[in-house]
């Protein structure tokens, strides 16, 4: 059996290792287009602040790991897929023949339509090469502009601020981390960053970038302000890396369409991670969830199905994000924005940067947002994933949302007790 995996990120690596466990004699090829050992993008901020060396970003620390696993790693770019021939065609001119193919190519950064975005010295912080360039320029006192304050932007923000640079952040939305946090939480994160010395402009766009008179760049903003910077880092969004699939017949939407076996419309082709439009646990819809826990879950499930374990069904990934912004921990789970007709509970201590918001449908917790309160994270995820019926405890949580642990213990013990009575 020949397995080819396109993409050497967390999803592809986990899939390759899972296949090796399930099929010791299979031929497994892992194809990554970057000239690096398989690494985690989530580790790049730690590399920027010199907390780890380049090797610290590697997904597997032993340089002989893949060879010992008998997994062939190729540093090539796949240009197209020939489904009829069961081949992946390489940009270098070669081909890889497969019995089963996994596409785990992840995402690519999206550049905003701003004049001047192609000037040299503007980086995405998406690759190790980006990381090297940013680390060499983000010196103490350097004026740095970060475009975008979404999840990825806020991870980079932490590293840029700790570098000692004079940091300015520009975000189009009316709050920071708009796809993860509601208005209250997003603006609390903004206040926290400003308190730490970071300049944050929300509801603001960069309208043009030109060569500066004193520093490298002169940046014009929608507010009418112009400021000069030594370095610009763009974190304005990503999209699934699916361009090479044009003409292949593999069905795509926002990402690659897959079923609950992570299988595409071609029975021999699978997809996982940021590139796959997989099932959302909370809604049942098929969406792209570009987070590492979902990527590794997808990779393992896809591999099991590629190896013939058809009982490996994707039950859906819980939307979850945990973010550390200059020491302030924030998190959101499930339908954190709530559901029409549902109820919510909220606790806010603005001065101490503490916030908790719970969202209910009937007596089931379906979503939550927290800020500066980490003790509830595990309980929140457990209640959402198990769809535990809270009964009278829902009303108690509406009055005091901090009683989550009590509600969890009471509700799960009741389930266990009732199950025992049924025996």
Image (tube, rainbow, N blue to C red):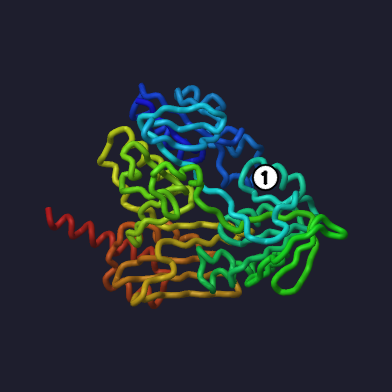
Quadrant where the image shows the N terminus: top left
Above or below, 278 relative to 364: above
Along the line of sight, which residue is nearer the eye, 150 or 387?
150
Above or below, 141 relative to 196: above
Along the line of sight, which residue is nearer the eye, 103 or 61?
103
Along the line of sight, which residue is nearer the eye, 386 or 340?
340
- Residue in view at x 72 percent, y 55 percent: 232
- Residue in view at x 29 percent, y 72 percent: 362
Pointer 1 residue: 130
Q: Quarter-wise, where is residue 174 in the image?
A: bottom right
Give x and y (percent) for residue 170. Answer: 67, 65
Give x and y (percent) for residue 393. Answer: 31, 71
Farthest right residue in view: 214
Left or right: residue 138 compared with residue 99: right
Along the line of sight, which residue is nearer the eye, 401 or 79?
79
- Residue in view at x 43 percent, y 67 percent: 336
Q: Quarter-wise, where is residue 83 in the image?
A: top left
Give x and y (percent) for residue 282. Answer: 35, 61
Q: Give the number of callouts.
A: 1
Where disc 1 sits, the SS reads helix
- Residue in view at x 78 percent, y 50 percent: 139
Above or below, 70 relative to 289: above
């Amino acid at each position: 059996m020949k397995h080819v995996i396109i993409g050497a990120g967390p999803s592809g690596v986990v899939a390759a290792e899972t296949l090796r466990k399930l099929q010791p004699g299979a031929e497994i090829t892992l194809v990554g287009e970057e000239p690096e050992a398989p690494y985690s993008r989530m580790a790049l901020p730690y590399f920027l602040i010199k907390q780890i060396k380049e090797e610290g970003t590697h997904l597997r620390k032993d340089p002989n790991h893949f060879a010992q696993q008998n997994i062939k790693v190729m540093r090539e770019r796949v240009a197209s897929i020939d489904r009829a021939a069961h081949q992946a065609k390489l940009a270098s001119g070669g081909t890889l023949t497969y019995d089963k193919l996994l596409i785990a190519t992840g995402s690519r950064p999206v550049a905003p339509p701003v004049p001047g975005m192609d000037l040299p010295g503007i980086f995405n912080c998406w690759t190790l090469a980006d990381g090297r360039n940013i680390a060499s320029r983000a010196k103490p006192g350097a004026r740095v502009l970060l475009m975008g304050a979404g999840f990825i932007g806020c991870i980079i923000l932490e590293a840029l601020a700790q570098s000692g640079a004079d940091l300015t952040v520009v975000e189009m939305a009316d709050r920071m981390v708009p796809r993860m946090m509601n208005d209250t939480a997003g603006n609390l994160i903004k206040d926290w960053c400003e308190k730490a010395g970071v300049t944050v402009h929300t509801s603001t766009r960069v309208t043009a970038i030109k060569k500066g008179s004193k520093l490298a760049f002169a940046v014009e903003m929608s507010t009418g302000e112009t400021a000069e910077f030594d370095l610009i880092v763009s974190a304005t969004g990503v999209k699934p890396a699916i361009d090479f699939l044009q003409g292949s017949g593999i069905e795509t939407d926002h990402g690659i369409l897959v079923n609950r076996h992570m299988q595409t419309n071609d029975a021999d082709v699978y997809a996982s991670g940021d590139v796959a439009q997989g099932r959302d646990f909370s809604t049942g819809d098929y969406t792209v969830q570009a987070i590492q826990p979902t990527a590794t879950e997808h990779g393992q499930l896809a591999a099991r199905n590629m190896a013939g374990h058809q009982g490996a069904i994707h039950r859906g990934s819980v939307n979850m994000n945990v973010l550390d912004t200059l020491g302030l921990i924030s998190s959101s789970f499930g339908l954190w924005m709530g559901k029409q007709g549902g109820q919510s509970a909220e606790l806010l201590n603005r001065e101490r940067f503490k916030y908790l918001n719970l969202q209910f449908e009937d007596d089931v917790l379906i979503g939550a947002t927290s800020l500066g309160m980490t003790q509830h994270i595990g309980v929140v995820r457990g209640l959402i994933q198990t769809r535990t019926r809270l009964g009278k405890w829902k009303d108690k949580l509406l009055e005091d949302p901090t009683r989550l642990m009590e509600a969890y213990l009471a509700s799960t013990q009741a389930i266990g007790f009732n199950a025992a009575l049924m025996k």
